[in-house]
Image (tube, grey):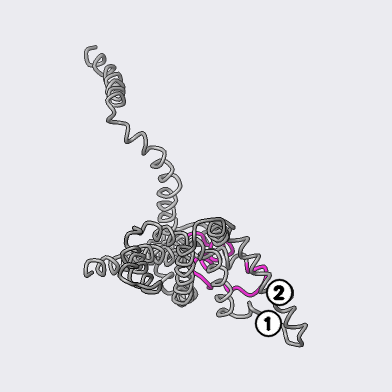
Amino acid sequence: MLRKHQNENIPRASAESAVIAVKSGRATPYLFLAPFMVTFTVFFVAPVLYAIYLSLFIPQQVNGNLTQVFGGLQNYEWALQDNQFLKSFIHIFFFGIIQIPIMLLLATILALILDQMVDGFLKRFFRTAFYLPYTIPSVISGLLWGYLYSLNLSPLNYIIQQNGGQPINFLASTPMTLFVIGNIVTWTWVGYNMVVLFASLQGVPRELYDAAKVDGATGWNVIRYIKLPLLRPALFLTLLFSIIGTSQIFAEPFALRSIGFVPNDITPNAYLYAVGAQNGNYSYAAALALVLAAVTFIFSSFFLRIIARNSNDQ
């Protein structure tokens, strides 16, 4: 009876301890973190764990029925030998080498121009106008630009035909399709990166500009020796985000499929979508997604290490 009475007091003591913790404020940080942790666990940790679990199985015919059989790391071995999957990495690699510098160069130029403008309506108007494409969903952007490059609907082809030329099929090959995707991505993200860089420029103390003017520095010298060096951290940040975003391109090629030629291996995400949604091999698609995430993580970590080393050297 004494032991039973003691066991009944344990929940009561735990509840009292919890109440005391809340009243004393010790539990306050955990209460603030709880909504984020629950959301993070449900929508990120749980899907990743399920993808890892799913990637360990392979579909096989057993007694005439297609069932999932434990295959260990077989899907990962197939992924590393999949020519289409590897080709998609080559596509996105060369895409990023060309598109990312152009996008960040345009964003930097626009940010510098805005920083030079006098505060007023025009400055607010252009800042909003440049940022506006980022607010448009990627699928809609893909469709809008896709019609511009469509063989039969493109106004560019209409102008060419009116002048006696032959229409151009902008979506006839993989390089041309990558060019169209690059145009869409650049149009979408230049404004976003411009806002990040412009915000960084707004944080530069105006005393530096005044001191430079006293020393006789011209506009170009101010940009070269003050603004661009101080923009370096923001440029590294936008470059890192651009690298990660480039590896995840999917909406643009998906939207363009209804208009022209878009191969399944145009990007890694497009290929794993074709494997999972079109071919129904969800376990192999999960393995491909995890390989893509691992490659992106390794490349981003390597890039961050290079940035940290350069910062320490300086």
**Residue sitting at x 49%, y 63%:** 117
> Of the residues shown, which amino acid type is indicated by label 2?
Ser
Q: Do the residues labelled 2 and 1 touch (CB within 8 Å)?
A: yes
Indicate the position of residue 277 as horizontal and vertical percent values: 57, 61
Q: Which of 297 and 99 is in front in this view?
A: 99
- Quadrant containing the C terminus is bottom left
> Of the residues shown, which amino acid type is indicated by label 1?
Ile
Which residue carries the number 2 mark? Answer: 154
Q: Locate residue 38: give its quadrant.
A: top left
Q: In this view, does 115 lie to the left or right of 165?
A: left
Asked if residue 266 lies in the magenta stretch, the reply is yes
Q: Regarding mark 1 in the picture, which secondary structure is present there?
A: loop
Asked if residue 273 lies in the magenta stretch, the reply is yes
Q: Which of 307 and 127 is in front in this view?
A: 127
Whether residue 222 can be seen here: yes
Q: In this view, does 246 lie to the left or right of 211?
A: right
Picture layout, residue 166 above or below residue 263: below
Which residue carries the number 1 mark? Answer: 168
Q: Locate residue 73: give its quadrant.
A: bottom left
**Residue sitting at x 34%, y 63%:** 210
Indicate the position of residue 109 as horizontal and vertical percent values: 47, 70
Q: Is residue 240 left or right of residue 248?
A: left
Picture layout, residue 33 above or below residue 190: above
Of callouts 2 and 1, the N-terminal one = 2
**Residue sitting at x 36%, y 74%:** 221
